[in-house]
Image: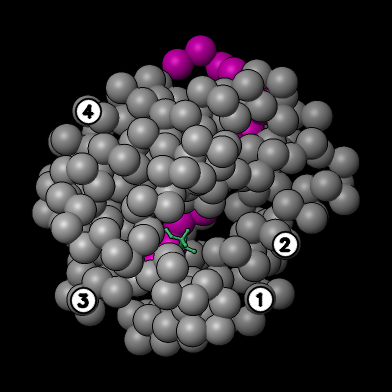
Amino acid sequence: MTRRGGLFITFEGTDGSGKTTQIRLLRERLMREGYEVVETAEPGGPPIGVQIRRILLDPANQELDPRAELLLYFASRAQNVAECIVPALKAGKVVVCDRFTDSTVVYQGAGRGLGQEVVEALHQVACGTLQPDITLYLDIDLETSLDRARQRNESQAGPAESRMDDQSVEFHRAVRDGYLKLAAREPGRVRVIDAGHDAATVEQAIWEQVAPLLETARVR
Ligand code: TYD
């Protein structure tokens, strides 16, 4: 791929891994250092993506077919790439995205058993050659992750977005295994961050991974 400007950072992790807090902390730090930051999320991002997100996470949609689910995640992503991510990178900004194709590799490819090949083929359609420059995978053990996700759903999100969190423990275990395999396959891009520590420690570990890239990337 020809070298483009900007820096594309993605965050991955199981539900309750602390991604939301760490994304906020990274964005604030980047802004303090003078970088222009665009934050986005999947499923979601631009308004069309947000509409697709509602279908995907609505617990009423129990009959959603795994292949329909897969295509909807990529529909949201294609829109986000075209409308938000690529224009921001072209403008030399730092893009921080909460989840990207790695989520589909592990949740639909591994978790739902649809396989990695189909996910990679759809990535080509939705994103072309676009890949993150760095992916921060926030690793946490299954028990802590499920506890935190349950608490969050009860206190904030309510039942409206719990469809994926409601999956079985086996599903969530397959997801974590999927992430660890992915990190072993692509150690250059996917960095495993131990998310079992306090937020400040995790923030520092993330910064140590991101800072060297900022020096070499063409970002403002
Ligand atoms: P969200 O509320 O954004 O959860 P989190 O804070 O954990 O990121 O919900 C996103 C859910 O969608 C989450 O359970 C993971 C799932 N997901 C997939 O299954 N495939 C995907 O490609 C993406 C992007 C997310």
The residue identified by callout 4 is 121
- The answer to the question of whether label 2 and label 4 lie on touching residues, with beta carbons closer than 8 A, is no
User: In the image, is residue 50 above or below residue 113?
Assistant: above
**Which callout, 3 or 4, points at the residue further toward the start of the chain?**
4
Judge whether residue 5 is colored magenta: yes
Marks 4 and 1, how far apart in space?
36 Å
Q: Amino acid at mark 1?
A: Ala
Amino acid identity at mark 3: Ser
* Residue 199: mark: 1
Extreme front residue here? 60
What range is drawn magenta here? 1-14
Residue drawn at (26%, 37%), measured in percent from left and top?
A: 71
The N terminus lies in quadrant: top left
Query: Looking at the picture, which amino acid does disc 2 mark?
Result: Leu
Label whose residue precedes the other's in the sequence (4 or 1): 4
- Which residue has dot 3 on it? 168
